[in-house]
Image (tube, rainbow, N blue to C red):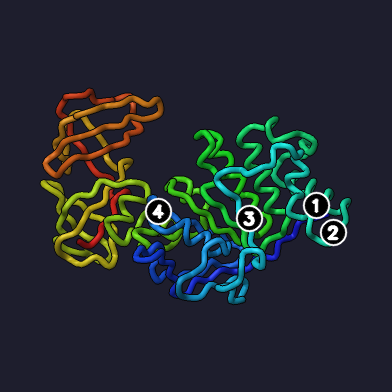
Amino acid sequence: MTIAPKPGGVEFRNVSRRYGAVVAVDNVSFVVDPGTLVTLLGPSGCGKTTTLRMIAGLESASSGTIMIGGKDVTRLPATDRNVTMVFQSYALFPHMTVLENVGFGLEVSPLSRSEREARSSEGLRLVGLAGYEKRLPSELSGGQQQRVAVARALVLEPEVLLFDEPLSNLDAKLRRRMRDDIRDLQRSLGLTSVYVTHDQEEALAVSDRIIVMNRAVIAQEGSPRDLYQRPADRFVADFIGGANLIDGVVTGRDGPTATVRVGAMTLDVQAPGIATGDVVVAVRPQAIRVEPVASDATLEVTVRKATYLGSHMEYALDSAVGELFAVDQDVSRAVSTGSLAHVRFDPRGIALVGR
């Protein structure tokens, strides 16, 4: 028996959620196209989880309209929405086998027992757990338990599959593997998925589009590349991938290229749409090259801390333009703590944001 979800789009039209005087989500509008994975990203308390729970029907909208598959579901309870969620906690029944856990949601379906078991087995095959049907959850690793939770959601063939911080309980190496598996599965089945995380790297890795939320509203939305290379404001520049935020001045333009002065340095940066005048220069840590000697277009710094991490060096630097954090892949010419050094900026890792 094959599993064939029928993906439906999601649309929020001016949706708000209030708890008395507290506004958790404030007049939010966005569209999730069928078959795509969109991530809601932001710090704790920004409204991303509340937004996800309103899609699921676990929270009700105070105002606005929620559409799933072209149907108004704003007032529909969770039980009447063809939506499933993979939670942060795996929520598996410890006394049930893996196969019984996966098939639990099918108990009320019109399928026969043999059909339910066949679909549950197919769900386990899709997540790489064929042969684990008779095990108990306690006999599985954390990553395997999360796969069971994903399979349990898949067998219901939802229009929309929701992920609420699904990898936060896993170690770093397993998180990387699981996020790739989730992305591959989503693409192969054409699932419409909405994914919540506060991990910027995770969001960049799995998403077709990212919606960055801050203080109950959408700060910016777009592709991972758009948000990383063209942040709309200081918050997005700092939150997506981390950035050193430095005051600068755009002194001239040549087509899409802006000439920007940062301290004693002058740089040419691709920044269409940025007018001359004061700007915030967002410099990615990987775009800062630390050198022991001065050269053209460099800035003098004091190395406050130098940390060797095997594949790269991390530096905390003091400079005339403020504190800088740098990640340098060249460990062969590491600069020691307390020494004077010079840095240059790679224009490809710089974005300009209007003040």
**Can you tell which quarter of the image residue 333 is in?**
top left
Instruction: Measuring from the top left, give residue 325's x and y in whole percent.
Output: 26, 38
Image position of 19 with respect to 106: above or below: below
* Residue in the foreground of this view, choosing between 251 and 24: 24
Q: Earlier in the sequence, mark 2 or mark 4?
A: 4
Determine whether label 2 and label 3 are within 8 Å by CB: no
- Label 3 packing within 10 angstroms: few (<14), some (14-19), many (20+): some
Nearer to us of marks 3 and 4 is: 4
Q: Amino acid at mark 3?
A: Arg
Residue tagged 4: 42
The secondary structure type at the circle numbered 2 is loop
- 2 or 4: mark nearer the eye: 2
Question: Visible in this render: residue 217?
Answer: no
Q: Which residue is mark 2?
A: 111
Q: Residues within 10 Å of mark 1 (few under 14, many from 20)?
A: many
Q: Mark 1 against mark 3, which lies toward the viewer? A: 1
Residue at 35% in and 33% down: 329
- Observer-nearest residue: 288 or 59? 59
Residue type at mark 2 is: Leu
